[in-house]
Each structure stands twice: as structure tokens, then as C-alpha cells.
Image (cartoon, rainbow, N blue to C red):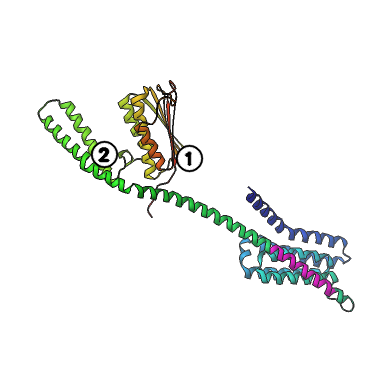
Amino acid sequence: MAESTLDTWETRLERVAHVIPYFVLTVTTTLYLLLSPHDTGAKLISLAIVVVMYGWMFFWFTAHPAWRSRQDLMAVFIVGLLVLYGVLGVRETWFGAVSFALYVYASEVLRVKWMFAAVAATAVLATASLFGGVPTGPEFIAFVIFLVLFVTVACTFTFVGHVTTEQSRKRKEMVVQLAATMEENAGLHAQLLIQAREAGVLDERQRMAREIHDTLAQGFTGIITQLEAAEQTGEWRERVATSVRLARENLTEARRSVHALRPAALADAALPEALAEVVHGWSGASGVAVEVTTTGTARPMHPEVEVALLRTAQEALANVAKHAEASRVGLTLSYMEDVVTLDVRDNGVGFDPDVTRADGFGLMTMRQRVSRLAGAFAVESEPGGGTAVSASVPAIPTVVAP
């Protein structure tokens, strides 16, 4: 908040600084026209020089901001201002105050050594304007004293302003670098979390793949063979056909697990569509109405995140079918900036968490899946008030190969 306030004030001061040259030139010209003893012809000449100076400042600085970083163009700009200021200052002492305009411009557009050279030259011209030129005789000593004083003061204030500007620039660079570093660290943290998770489960994944391949897949193959033989006898045709279909589906899922351990529902669909497919099948089998809602902007998440949420939804629905005696279920998938949340609520019989243990194998599995992703898992229920299961995991985006 403080950083933003400082930046705002710096922007305002910069705008004021760009107005100062025009303001000073306008005030001094007005005083000159009102108070100078010069005749009308001399005043018209001075006024013409003032108009040229207005145009010079507007053309080289105000109208072309991109030129301010080009030292060659800005050298022409400052030299032109010095010439115009020198002519005006010698013609009339009132125009000595225009030196403020040159100090502002030189401090902003010139590099350090040329900046001090321009400031010193401006101080010399300001001293000459004060004395109406370079005096001779006894006044020359006073001229030299004022010249040293003006040059010293002008260069000192210019040095202080330069140091302050450099500190502000370095502060802004540090803020930008810090923000970039924090963003990079956040991305690295998320990537390291995934890498650690993948490295930690690689051995377990390979073991599970071998177990599934050597037991479950082979067992399903034997079941299909036996049921197809029974079907050929003509007995229990409908039941056998159903058994064959289910067994084939399980065999397909087992083979998918061997190759990728990714649910079939997520193979060709995004998480919201996969959840809708799972819910539709569950609702048709259980006869319980389910309302599915997605909030926030749906976006691809890392496969581990999507699998955890899909499996949590499946297990929560399975628990509803087994225990809840519910007539209605609400499932909400919420995409937020940092997390993705899944909520499953039913209007079933519920239970008292203080009396009934809520750490069965299904709940333990859901809690483990969410905990492995550094997420949060909660179950809320009361007798007659239904049950709510909530899982919240980090919104880790999918990693796209370059």
C-alpha cells in the first residue's frame, strides 16, 4: 500500500515538473510586459523569442516523449534552450527565473556529466542576467562571487535530485525483481511438489501395475472365457451377456490402469464433463437425483489433481448409496485462483461424528488422496441433517511440453 502511494506521488510530481517550465516562462513574460521599461518594439522582439522558446520546449520535449532517451536529440534541445535563455536573460533581468526550466530539463534528459555541465552553464547565464551581462570594474568581484554561489547551489541541488532519482529507480527495479522472483518461486514450488509426488509414487505405481497385470487382468480374462462357454450352452443367456459386458469393461479399465493409471472418464474429457458422466451413471444405477454445479472458470489441471477429485467424487457417491438413504445429492466443483474445491452434499440420514466413527476405508482413501496434494479434506454431518464431504486441493495447472 505504501509502495503504491509513493509511486502515485512520484507520478504526480513528474507531471508538475513538466509544467514548471511553461509556468515560469509565462509568469516571467507577464511581469516583463507589465513592468519592463523597454519600448514596444523591444518588447515585441522579446515576446517573439519567448514564443520560439515555447515552441522549442513543446516540439522537442512535450510532443515527442520517445526522444527523451536519445542523448543526441536532447543535447540539441538543451543547447537550443541555453541560447534562447541567454538571449532573453541578457535583454531583461526578469527572464533570469527561466533558469528553473533548464534545471528541470537537464536533470531529466541528460546523463550525469552533461547534466552538470548544462546546469553550470545555466547558472552562469542566470548570473549574467542578474547583472545585465558581464560587468567590469568593482562589480566584477560581486559577479564572480554570485557566479560561484549560483553554480555551487545549482550543482548541489542537482546532485541531491539525481541521487534521489537513482534511489527511486533502484527501488522500483528491486520491487519488480522481487515480484518476479516470488512468482518464479511459486511456480517452482508447484513443480517441485508434482515432481516429489511423481518420484515418491513411481515405485508404488510400477508395483501396482505388475499386480494388476498378473492378477486382476488375468482373472478377468479367465472369467470372460468361462462365461462365453456358458453362453454357448443357451442357459442364463441374458445374465451371462451382462456378465461378459461388465467383465470386459473391468478388463479395459484394468489395462488402462496398467498403462497410465488414469480413469477412463478423464481420457477424452475435462474434469467437469468427466464428473457429469460419472454422476449420470451413478444416478441411473442408484435412482437418486443429483444436481451438478461448476463455479469459476474451468481450466485444465495437473492429472494428479483431476484424478484425486474424480476418485473423491466416486467414493463419496458410493458412500451415499451405501449409507445415506438420500433422495437428493448436490455436487459442486469450484475453480478458484489458488485452489479447486469439490463439495458433495446429500439429504440423507446423516450421523453424529462424535458417536459414529467417520474414518472408514473409503473416507481414509479420500483423505489420503487429498493429503498427498497438500490439500484439505473435511466431513460434516448430523443425524437427520445429511452429510457434506469437502475436498480442496491446490490449483496446479497441467504441465504443457514445450
- Mark 2, other Cα within 10 Å: few <14 / some 14–19 / many ≥20: some
- Which residue in the structure is indicated by mark 2? 253
Q: Amino acid at mark 2?
A: Glu
Query: What is the x, y in percent for residue 181?
Result: 52, 55
Foreground pick, 133 / 121: 121
Residue where numbered disc 1 is placed: 336
Indicate the quadrant containing the C terminus: top left, top right, bottom left or bottom right: bottom left
Q: Residue furthest bottom?
A: 137
Say which of 306 and 381 sits in front.
Answer: 381
- Whether residue 222 is visible to the viewer of this picture, yes or no, is yes
Q: CA distance from mark 2 to mark 1?
A: 31 Å
Instruction: Describe residue 187's horizontal placement relative to residue 20 as left or right.
Output: left
Residue 263 vs residue 132, the one in the foreground: 263
Point out residue 175 in the picture as x, y percentages from the top left corner.
Answer: 58, 55
Left/right of residue 80 with respect to residue 191 in the rendered view: right
Spot occupied by residue 123 in the image (x, y as percentages of width and height): 77, 70
Name which residue lies at 60% across and 57% down.
Answer: 172
Q: Give the left or right position of residue 355, taking residue 104 as reference.
A: left
Q: Position of residue 264 (x, y in %)?
A: 30, 39
Residue 156's quadrant in the figure? bottom right
**In the displayed structure, does residue 297 sit left or right of residue 278?**
right
Which element type, helix, strand or loop, lies under badge 1?
loop
Q: Which residues are magenta?
A: 143-162
**Local SS, label 2:** helix
Residue type (three-letter) at the residue carrying disc 1: Met
Residue 208, quarter of picture? top left
